[in-house]
Every structure is written in C-alpha cells, then in structure tokens.
Image: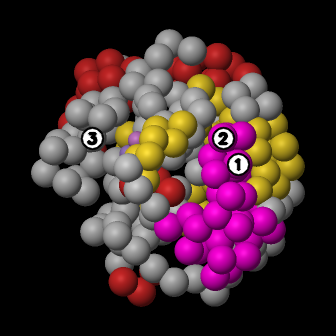
C-alpha cells in the first residue's frame, strides 16, 4: 500500500461519501443527505463543499444536488453530460460534464469516469428525464493515492480494466443486492479491481437491501482474496 497522503473519508450512509482532502477542501460523492435515513443529523450540513460528484440520476444519489449546490456553491459539479444539462436548467452553475473514458482535474484530483451497469433515469413532475449512462468515478489525488466509487452497479468483468488502468487502492462498492451487486459478486469485483480495501455501500438503508459486510468478508475468504473490509457505520470516518 502506498504511503502517499489520502483523503479522510466519512460515510454519510447509503452511497454518500464526504471526502476531506489533505488541502482542506471537501468533495461530496452522491449528494443525498436530507432524505437519507442513514445520514446523521449533524452531518447533513457542511462548512464547505468544494466539489460534488454524481454517478447517476436516481434520487438516492442526487436528491439534494440542487439544494446543496445553491447553498454551498461548489466550484465544480461532476456528472454525465445529461445530468449537467439538467442541473444547469435548474440554475446550477459550475457544472463539469464528462463521459465514460474521460478524465478531468477537479480540486487537484484527476477524476476519471468509468462504466457502471445500471440505469440513470428520473421521473419528475410526471416527466421522464434521461440522465445519460450510469457511471462510476476513479479519483487520483495529488501524490498518487487512488480510489474508486462504483456508484450503483452490477458486476462486470471490465472491472479488471479499471484495476489495470488506474490501480485503485480502495473501492466503495455496493453490496445491498436487488438494485446492485450482492456480496457474492462484490467479492469478485474486489478480485477484478485488485483493491486492498473495500468500503461496502448501498446496504442496510432499506429492508430490501439485504447484503451485509460480514457476508462480503466471508465471500472474500472463500475466494482467497486478500482485501480488508472497512465496515464504516454512517458518520464514521476512515
Ligand atoms: Ni440507482
Ligand atoms: Mn441507488
């Protein structure tokens, strides 16, 4: 494992992750705190948000994007081209659209957009809005530390390419089942990615999201994959 500086990650429940960079800047992945039943009350407000990253258009991932963007005025909001167009139409400035395969510098981090196997539509006021393809992010911070936030996804074998191309040390992976991978599949994702640490996300928020970190631990053992499961409770930091 590298000894380059890494962010402090605070799990806000479901898929939302606050990332405090060594510079003091704050990047928020998946802006959903207000209606997020797992987010501790005291962590629903921020001193600052310098960037927001959104993997897809479902409300449990971007439900508070507009409100937080208006309140904290992040310098960049990273998402698919289509989500950025939608945000801009809501009066949000500083959108930073991108698409799969591309990368851009945000707060000194190299942010790459990668594939996810999911959907990204939104129904609002009876109208259907197409958020483009669902995505994940690989982020390399200044100094080299690299991590992956998978968003919502099923398992896909191209995760091997993500491992080969970007060499992430840590991954935030959904394990809840029903809408995403379960722990059985997530263990294979860890093997494909070659990560040394995994933070399970998208589990336990609702009764239907049944995957558990201890099951992921067992599945990794059964596969013979050495990967530490960092089980963060909502509000906990690593
Ligand atoms: Ni989703
Ligand atoms: Mn979701």
What's the magenta region? Answer: 64-93
Mark 3: give few (<14), some (14-19) or many (20+) Cα within 10 Å. many
Q: Tell me which image quadrant ligand 2 sits in.
A: top left
| Mark 1 touches mark 3? (CB < 8 Å) | no
Q: Is residue 22 magenta?
A: no
Colouring mode (rainbow / by chain / secondary structure / one colour): secondary structure
Q: Is residue 71 magenta?
A: yes
Q: Quadrant of residue 107?
A: bottom right
Looking at the rendered structure, which numbered label has been put on residue 85?
1
Ligand 2 closer than 8 Å to label 3 CB: no
- Residue to which mark 3 is pinned: 176
Q: Is 67 situated above or below 193?
A: below
Measured from the top left, where is residue 212 in percent x and y? 22, 44
Q: Is 52 situated above or below 219?
A: below
Measured from the top left, where is residue 179 in percent x and y? 30, 35
Residue 170 appears left or right of 200:
right
Looking at the rendered structure, which numbered label has been put on residue 82?
2
């Amino acid at each position: 494992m590298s000894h380059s500086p890494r962010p402090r990650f605070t799990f806000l429940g479901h898929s939302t992750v606050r990332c405090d960079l060594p510079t003091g800047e704050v990047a928020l992945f998946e802006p959903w705190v207000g209606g997020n039943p797992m987010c501790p009350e005291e962590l629903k407000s921020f001193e600052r948000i310098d960037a927001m990253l959104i993997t897809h258009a479902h409300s449990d991932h971007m439900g508070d994007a507009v409100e937080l963007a208006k309140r904290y005025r992040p310098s960049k909001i990273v998402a698919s081209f289509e989500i950025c167009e939608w945000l801009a139409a809501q009066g949000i400035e500083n959108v930073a659209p991108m698409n799969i395969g591309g990368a851009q510098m945000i707060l000194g981090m190299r942010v790459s957009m990668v594939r996810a196997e999911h959907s990204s539509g939104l129904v609002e006021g009876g109208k259907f809005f197409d958020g483009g393809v669902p995505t994940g992010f690989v982020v390399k911070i200044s100094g080299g530390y690299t991590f992956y936030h998978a968003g919502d996804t099923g398992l896909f074998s191209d995760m091997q390419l993500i491992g080969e191309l970007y060499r992430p040390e840590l991954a935030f992976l959904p394990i809840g089942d029903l809408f995403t991978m379960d722990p059985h599949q997530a263990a294979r994702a860890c093997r494909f990615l070659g990560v040394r640490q995994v933070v399970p996300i998208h589990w336990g928020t609702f009764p239907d999201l049944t995957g558990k970190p201890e099951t992921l631990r067992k599945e990794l053992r059964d596969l013979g994959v050495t990967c530490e499961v960092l089980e963060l409770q909502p509000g906990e930091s690593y």
